[in-house]
Structure formats: structure tokens, C-alpha cells
Image (cartoon, rainbow, N blue to C red):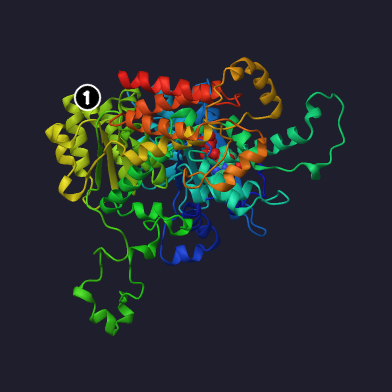
Amino acid sequence: MQIDSSVRFDAVGGLSDHIAALKEMVIFPLLYPEVFERFKIQPPRGCLFYGPPGTGKTLVARALANECSQGNRRVAFFVRKGADCLSKWVGESERQLRLLFDQAYRMRPSIIFLDEIDGLAPVRSSKQDQIHSSIVSTLLALMDGLDSRGEVVVIGATNRLDAIDPALRRPGRFDREFFFGLPNKEARKEIFKIHTCDWTPKLLDTFIDELATECVGYCGADIKSLCAEAALCALRRRYPKIYSSNEKLQLDINSVKINAEDFVMAMEKIIPASRRAVPSPGQALSPIMAPLLGNTLSRILQALQRVFPHAELALKKDQQQGNLNPFLKGDAFGRNYESPSILEENVTDTTICRPQGKFLDFSRKAYWQPTSCRPHLLLAGKAGYGQASHLAPAVLHSLEMFPVHTLDMSVLFVNTSSPEETCAQLIREAQRTAPSIIYIPHIHLWWDSVGATLKATFLSLIQNIPSFAPVLLLATSDVCHTALPAEVQTLFNSDFGEVFNIQSPSEDERKHFFEDLILTQAAKPPASRRKAEVSKRKRKKTDSSFPVAKRRRSFQFNEEQRHTSAEKAMDIMTESAIVVLVDYCELKQLLDMVTDLTKEADIFYFEKLYAKICQCIYQHQDDNDKTELLKVLKKEFKALARM
Ligand code: ATP
């Protein structure tokens, strides 16, 4: 088929490791056959791309075909979707497959891209019909029959690796597997840059950085549609008439300027694919919760770094993507490239004086890479302390460069396979994608609800993970470590800092949580003059009964009294230039009251109370005189204190 020849590797963001490996596997055998001939290396016949939708599998295959076509040499690219190869006539699908391979061979060098290969070669079982079984066998035979010069390469793509017949994954068939995960922040930045590179003027680097931070869980395709949607928002803003007019309007394209607001609107519209399918467990602390839980989160991250030093890589802000994953970089293993010669012809001094008399040195170099031994961390605290609802998701969000494998009831019991099978697959996958995270929220509930076989499977699989494999087990519990079942307790060694006890928020944190709401937002003037006038008229009656003796204060800020910055205060004043009557001492009293009220409270109580205060503020948003609002708030707090 004709493919867009402009798609090259530079149109692919954040997959540099895959690109390097593919060059080695596919392009080099085509370009430098002599090297492969010299060392009698058999180039791979196929590779499997797997991962969630929209992560660039097809894009990379296309770019690969274009990159292989250099100068006069063109590489034929054949794309088939798994289901397209199926036919209702017995034997027809097999014939089509044979034809495809024949044609690819005739037009070699060529790449056959089998998209959604799980539809074509599903796991063969007694339950599966005979037809599928025969197609899989044909495909296997065809792949085995490919000659060994690497001139026909088969690439299979799937969203579900477990749904593919395992025979296809044997060496000599799809030898290499590439996981296309959701992009991390650096990768998202690259993808944003790719999809906005033709915009003039270009987006600021700092803005792209901010966008990438916000777009956790977006795949490449989501980012592409986000950019398109933002551009459409800008067009809509500039030319609202084009929606109502039937005529083609004369547009001045240069006057369409995309701004941050367009991206905000676009983000409201686009739900990333990952959240549509399985919600991603990582979630940053919301700006509301940050004052309450921010300190605890930083303490957890510190504890985590001690248990799982790889976390440091994710937490370093200015890392370049190329440095992010030392496990994929040859030199990060600390290999000594000036190692002694192992060739017969070249016996040198270094060959004779090699360290420990051995050529192969697999010892770990502590100074080259972080080391952890069975890194486990339990976030334990009373129910409602936010460990599973806010803190663990925020931890996972900070570690978003590592793949997360969530092991909870919804995963175990919703899948079609047995819970034991799902659990085994998930832990194996975590091992394969290391450094990675196995996340078990509410481990106390989980343990109580699953059967003995699953418990045994889980424990043995966890124990089978090699000791120094960087697979973090992160769990949350609503009961303290010592109250957990003995088997779960043994997973977390408190002597080595693997148990983090979450405390209830301190007085300062509680105060900080309500501060902005009570001291700033409750004292905000009405949004506009017009509204103020309306509210004035509405409140005329009340005004007449307003006690003259009452301290009437204009809306003023005092650095000592509040933490709000002076600039912010000025902003509010110039925005409205309306005098607001509010007793600041009373506001402070209210803040103290609510801080007292929430002593020992759980997170849900904080959230409920926060919403209650917001509602009161909203109801009184048009008031110039906030006395009524303060009264209502006081009443609410008193009522709650009595309960
Ligand atoms: P599916 O599994 O649904 O077939 P896929 O993984 O093959 O999805 P693609 O079709 O390659 O996804 O991606 C769709 C589009 O998203 C691409 O054409 C490209 O524009 C954009 N895209 C995806 N990933 C990337 C990326 N890493 N860099 C740049 N663009 C990307």
C-alpha cells in the first residue's frame, strides 16, 4: 500500500529506545547485510508491538517502513488488520495469508504489519473453533518458512499480549516484544512538540512543560487530538460566526491565536483513552487537598526513596528522557567497555590480568545504578486518612515514569480469566517491565476477600521475584501493620522503613487547608458592579437594621494578619473597586473554630466541610456585606461541634 512517506522516526515522540532497537533489528540487516553475514547473525523475522491504543504502534511501523526506504531502495509495506484476513469460506483466510506472504516475498525487502493480531491468532484452545486454530498454524508455518536474510519482517500489533497464541512468541517467530506504554512527562513533551511544530508562532517551552505535567494518562493519539481541539477552540473564539453561517467566510488565519484557555477547554472535552478504559491509578494531589496532605506526601516520598532508590530518577524534575531509564542503557550497567580482549588473535596484558580471573563480570556496581532489595512499602493509617484515596495515587503520579500494575478486586474479578491467572499475569508483566510498581490498594480488604489459592499464588509469585529486581510493591491499609494478617505483615519489614504510618493532619495543616477559603474567598467582593448594585437593592432592608456600632471595615489586607500576598489583594481590589464589609477578626475566629472542629477528623469530613463552606460562600457571593455569611458559617460550625 501507499503510505505517507513523510512519517519518519522524528515524527515519533518518546520512543527512542524502541527506535534504536528496531534500527538494529530491521534496518541494519537491510542496510548492512555484510555485518550480519560476517557474524552469521540471523536477523529477526518478526516482532510484536503491544500496549494500550493510541501509543504509536502503527506510527512506528510506518516510520520504520519509510526509514528503510532509502535512496532507490523502497521497502514494501503491507498492512492487514487481524479481522480483515478472516473469511467466511473455509480455507480462504489461509489462502489470503499465503498470498500476502508470497507477495511480500516477491516484493522484498518488505514489512508485513499485522494490526490487531489477536483477532487473527488468538490463543488456541479446545474451546476455540477449528478455523482459528488452522489460521494460527498457517501463520506459524509461513513465518517459519521465511528466509533468514531479514528481507521480510513481520510486525504484529496488539492491545492484549495475553490474547495471542503463545506459539507465536517463540524465538524464530516474533522474537522481540516491544511494550508501548502511556508516555511519561518527557515523552508527552516531545509528542506535544511534534504535533505543534508547524504552528506559528510556536508554543513556549515552559507552556509545553506545564501541559505535559497536566496530561497524565494521555496517549500520543490523545495529545494529537488535544492539539487539534485547542486549535478549533481558538478558531471558534475568533470566528464564532462560522458555525451559524452557511456561506464560506473570508478568514484571516493569522488572527487566530491559540491561548492557554483554548487548551483548558480542549482538556475539558477530551477524556484520555486510558481513563475511558481503566482509570489510571496515579492522580496528583488536588490544589484543595495539597495544603492538608502535601507534607505527608513529601514524607512518604522521602521514605519511598530510602526503600526504592529508583524513585529518585522519577522525582528528579529536570531529567532528560534519555537518562531516565538506566536499565535500557548499556553503559548504565557500569560495563567496562575497555574490557579484556576475548579473541584468540589478540592476547594482551589486560587479557591475562583480568579481574578475578573471569571474563564475564555480572557483579552489580553500587555506584552505577540504584539498588533495592524487595522494595515494599505499606501506607497504613486509620480509615479515612486518605492513604488510598489521595496519598497513594499522588505517590503513583510522582512515579509516573514506571508502569503501574494494579492488583485490586476490580482487576481480579472482572477479568474473564480466573483471579489466579490474572494475578500471575500481572506480576509477571510487572517483572518484565521493571522497574515497575505493583499497587494493591486496601490490602486488608483484599486479603480477607480472596480465596486460599489466590493467596498462595500471590505469595509465591511475589517471593519468586528476584531479590534485587526493581519491582516496588506499594500497598495501602486501613488498619495498622500489626493488625494485618500474619502473611501480609511479613511482606513489609518495619525495621527497614517499609511501613509508613499516616497521622491525622496537624493543627497547622488543618488551618492551612481552610485558610484560603475562610480568609480570602469568604471575604471576596461581588464579581461586578452591576451585581453589587442588585445585591445592594436586595439587601436594603437588612442594611437599615445593620447595627451602627458594628465595626465596618473595608476590604483591606494586612500582611501580618493573613498570608495572602499583597499583589493578590491589590488584584481583588482593582478588579472590583467595591467596598466589602467584613469583620476580619470574626473571620479569624471562624478559622480557629474550624481548625478545632476538625481535630482527629478524617479526610472525608474535611472534604464535606470544605464543600459546605463553599456552598455558603457561593450563596452569599453577591453580598457586599458579609455579616450574614459569617453568621451562617458560625451557626454551621457550632452545630457540627455539638454532634
Ligand atoms: P491502536 O492500538 O489503536 O492501533 P496505535 O498504538 O497503533 O493504536 P497509532 O495509530 O500509532 O496508535 O497512533 C495514532 C496517532 O496518534 C498517530 O497517528 C500519531 O499521530 C499519534 N501518536 C501516537 N503515539 C505517538 C507518539 N509516540 N509520537 C507522536 N505521535 C503519536
List x then y, in percent, for residue 301.
Answer: 33, 48
Q: Which of 241 and 590 is in front in this view?
A: 590
Q: Residues within 10 Å of mark 1 (few under 14, many from 20)?
A: some
Residue at the farthest bottom position: 349
List x then y, in percent, for residue 625.
Answer: 58, 26
Measured along the vertical axis of the image, is residue 92 above or below residue 333? above
Residue at the farthest top position: 541
Q: Which of 214 and 110 is in front in this view?
A: 214
Residue at the farthest front position: 549
Q: In which quarter of the image is residue 70?
A: bottom right
Q: Nearer the viewer, residue 363 or 600?
A: 600
List x then y, in percent, for residue 482.
Answer: 14, 36
Residue 383 relative to residue 395: left or right:
left
Q: Does the residue labelled 1 lie within 8 Å of ligand 1?
A: no
Q: What element carries label 1?
A: loop
**Quarter of the figure that contains the N terminus:** top right
Measured along the vertical axis of the image, is residue 62 above or below residue 241? below
Q: Quadrant of residue 297?
A: top left
> Which quarter is ligand 1 in?
top right
- Picture residue at 61% right of the left edge, 52% below the top: 8
Quick check: can you spot residue 226? yes
- Picture residue at 28% right of the left edge, 32% below the top: 423
Q: Which residue is tagged 1?
A: 450
Residue at the farthest left position: 486
Q: Which amino acid does label 1 sit on?
A: Val
